[in-house]
Image (tube, grey):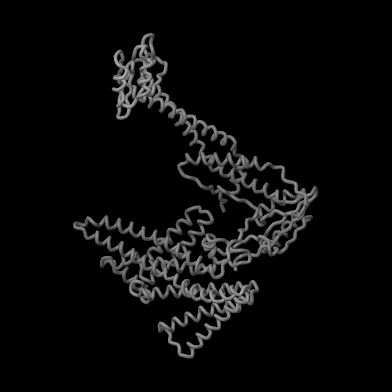
Amino acid sequence: MSILQINKIHILGYIHLKKEIMDFLFDSGAVEIIDTDSGIQRSFTPVNISEIDKKLSELDFAISFLRKFAEEKIKSVLCSNEFYEKIISEFNYEYILQFCKNAEMSFAKIKNSKEKLLSQKNGFLPWLSLDVKMDLVKDTATASVFSGFLPATNLKKVGEKIGKDVYIETISQNKKYAYFVLICDKDKTTEAVETLKECGFSKTVFPSESLSVKEYINGIERELKALLDEEKLLLDDIKKRLSALEKLMIIYDYFYNIKIKTTAGNFLNETKETFYLCGWILSKKAEELKSEIEKKYPETEIYFTKPAPAEDVPVFIGNNRFTKPFNFVTELYGHPVSGGIDPSPLLAPFFVIFFGFCLTDAAYGVILTILSFIVLKKMRLAEDMSKFFHLMFYSGLSTIILGAVTGGWFGDLFDRMPSGFYFLKNFKNSLIMEKINPATQPLNFLVLALILGSIQVLFGLLINLYYQLKLKNIFFAVFQQIPTIIIQFVLIALVISGIGIISFGKNVSVALFLILGLSMLSIAFTQWKINNAVGEKLFWSIFTNYSIITGNFLADTLSYARLFALGLSTGLMAMAVNEISFLVLKLPYYIGVIPMIIFLVAGHLLNIAINMLGAYVHTSRLQYLEFFSKFYISGGRVFKPFGEIRKYTIQAR
């Protein structure tokens, strides 16, 4: 399908051309270089990878540091090649790296100092009313002085236990603690120490300064203010250097790609005179690359080989710009194996139709389409996000069409509009296909969902038939896969006949049952042939037929009824929002107008968000479980060519 053929490329050249050829391959981005084990002596590059890693680490730190202070959170830089080269050659990034390191250390120092001062301040705040100099709160020749705090309930107990000749002055007290100074005779020191310890006393040590506590705290506050001023100056200095942030991102990508080049060089095998390189290349680019290298370096030998059956061949999906967004759905499940089938273009029409089927509201589709278009045009997106919003754009268009034919425009909002807006109702009614209107013909809507499901299940079985023929599994394709498809067709025909849509005659019905029986016998015969033990032969002969009928025909097909359920629920929730909004409008004196508008807008926005999520999840589920299970084999390794990779910069085109 759209998995492109990949071959092996072998390049043998003189050692003095190694760097030039590696640079050429890097710029071309066409070859994934692989390690080889051919027994040739390998001479690793003298460039120290650890030095590059250290540089990248320093740059990453500086970028993260400056990002914290940028008002706009810059994720990537759009720059031309000229600007990119200019920054690399002219920008003194070492100075900025050192500045960021110093600034980080300064912030840490300021922070530690602030925490220390605040701790000191908070420790002395309860002593603010102490009216003596702090250096006087100490023992004298005849008295012992204790300053500190203990649980408030124990303060009275201290005085009672020590007895007379003790002076206690309470400085402050809160619900938990009492802060006090206790003065006693020297001969009562031991008794005082034991009593205080017993009562949970914690000592407060005052600085030996001839200052009151208030003066000391004022000094702390002046120091804190000085630190805040220093911090402000540092912030101003950082903001002046924020213009370097984008330049650092460019420098990071430059060194990152040097690392890629250096690492790739270690995959080459070398002798004193020659080097050998092996890798993967897309077949369609092989001859063009060979021609360019031989033109520049005619003495170089280049040849191509087919991958061996057991080799780990990477996978490259080559869809066009219309089907490429659907790679997003496939990649979330897993890349196809080499030689497998890419389901992205195959699921594309089903995905957008099923998504629209789940929303079934044209107005919601218009909103989704416009929002997706604006995001794609106005925002710089990574490749995966670009795929996603393209996917939503296509799904929005599908929702507009399916919403219009089923009559959904913000639910039944157009039917509730005043007579002056009657033209909206006429416009809506002119587009409705009444036979599939979920509001009036829900059964037909369900049948349509099951028909679409049957078509996709059959399509998946046909793809598997093609895949088996491609692999030359002729026996399996003829005796199992074709009968499986026939069983699906026959059972659908019997159901159609049974419910009276088409009436078959007796002979036709007998023929259908005969074909069904022969197909089941063919499948049983296949399982009998491909299994070994008699027990396995019997089990798989019966179980395979059972799983085809209950799995493909019943379970998988009925699973598409979720399209009906989600499509119906979107409309019903929208109608509920409208009903509540117009009930609010009936409040007297027109006081309900503004609440009605708010509820109407908020309710529909919430409904869009919830049902968009449901539409995406369940539509993807149908692809993964009901469609992929028929033919898809995942687990492929993505083709990653040797070339420039940018983490922070986007090349302007």
Which image quarter: residue 306? bottom right
Residue at point 42%, 71% (across, down): 561
Q: Is residue 35 visible?
A: yes
The answer to whether residue 460 is above or below residue 196 is below
The answer to whether residue 405 is above or below residue 205 is below
Residue 88 left/right relative to 351: right
The answer to whether residue 156 is above or below residue 2 is above
* Front residue (pair 627, 360): 627
Q: How many marks?
A: 0
Q: Which corner quadrant holds the N terminus?
A: bottom right
Residue 247: image x %, image y %? 56, 42
* Front residue (pair 395, 280): 280
* Front residue (pair 386, 135): 135
Residue 530: image x %, image y %? 62, 74
* Furthest-right residue in this view: 273
The answer to whether residue 337 is above or below residue 77 is below
Residue 38 left/right relative to 210: right
* Furthest-top residue in this view: 141
Residue 84: image x %, image y %? 59, 46
Q: Is residue 225 visible?
A: no
* Front residue (pair 558, 282): 558
Residue at point 58%, 80% (across, down): 522
Residue 6: image x %, image y %? 66, 62
